[in-house]
């Protein structure tokens, strides 16, 4: 019985590893400028579904959802955050860049081969955002 569970777990990890969405490691801009973070997937996730979300995370804090369903903002999220999608690529645009926008941003997308109830999604690697005025004190890993 346990070997079946082990095989299922290995298959799960394999499918997860193949589903990573591609984001730039970092973006930067001067305060007040507009920056865009791209998130590239495939025709099995971003290209097929409009279930794309963006999440902001500060060190040591829980992630906060900025955008869901490609371009919908939850209540309380400023309208300077906007989302869009073209083909297999989704984008998060931050206009009027502020110092408080220095954070990590993640995209996520539902993908085929899973169900909404399984919680299995494609996730992007993090993008660090840094306003220019802070760049001299900030290094990207």
Image: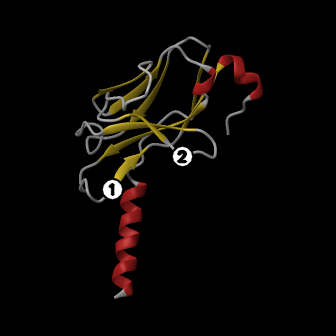
Q: Mark 2 near mark 1, Cβ–Cβ under 8 Å?
A: no
Residue ID for mark 1: 119
Relative to 135, say whether 30 is above or below. Answer: above
**The one of 54 and 113 positioned closer to us in this rendering:** 54
> On the rendered image, what quadrant is the C terminus found in?
top right
Compared across the picture, whether 56 is left or right of 121 comes to right
| Few, some or many residues within 10 Å of mark 2 (<14, 14–19, 20+) | few
Q: Secondary structure at mark 1?
A: loop
Name the residue furthest bottom: 1
The residue lying at 61 percent from left, 25 percent from top is 100
Name the residue furthest top: 32
| Few, some or many residues within 10 Å of mark 1 (<14, 14–19, 20+) | few
Relative to 71, say whether 1 is above or below. Answer: below
Q: Position of residue 113 (x, y in %)?
A: 24, 56
> On the rendered image, what quadrant is the N terminus found in?
bottom left
**For residue 101, what is the image quadrant?**
top right
Counting residues from the N terminus, which is met first, the one under dot 2 or under dot 1? 2
**For residue 54, what is the image quadrant?**
top left
Q: Secondary structure at mark 2?
A: loop
Q: Position of residue 40 (x, y in %)?
A: 39, 35
C-alpha gap between disc 2 and disc 1: 18 Å
Residue 62's tag is 2
The residue lying at 36 percent from left, 32 percent from top is 74
Residue 23's tag is none
């Amino acid at each position: 019985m346990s070997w079946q569970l082990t095989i299922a777990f290995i298959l799960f990890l394999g499918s997860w590893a193949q589903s990573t969405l591609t984001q730039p490691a970092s973006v930067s801009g001067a305060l007040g400028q507009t920056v865009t973070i791209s998130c590239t997937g495939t025709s099995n996730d971003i290209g097929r579904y409009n279930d794309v979300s963006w999440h902001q995370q500060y060190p040591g804090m829980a992630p906060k959802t900025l955008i869901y369903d490609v371009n919908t903002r939850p209540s309380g999220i400023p309208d300077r955050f906007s989302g869009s999608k073209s083909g297999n690529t989704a984008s998060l645009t931050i206009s009027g860049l502020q110092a408080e926008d220095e954070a990590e941003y993640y995209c996520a997308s539902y993908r085929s081969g899973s169900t909404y109830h399984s919680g299995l999604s494609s996730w992007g690697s993090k993008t660090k955002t840094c306003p220019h005025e802070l760049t001299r004190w900030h290094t990207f890993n």
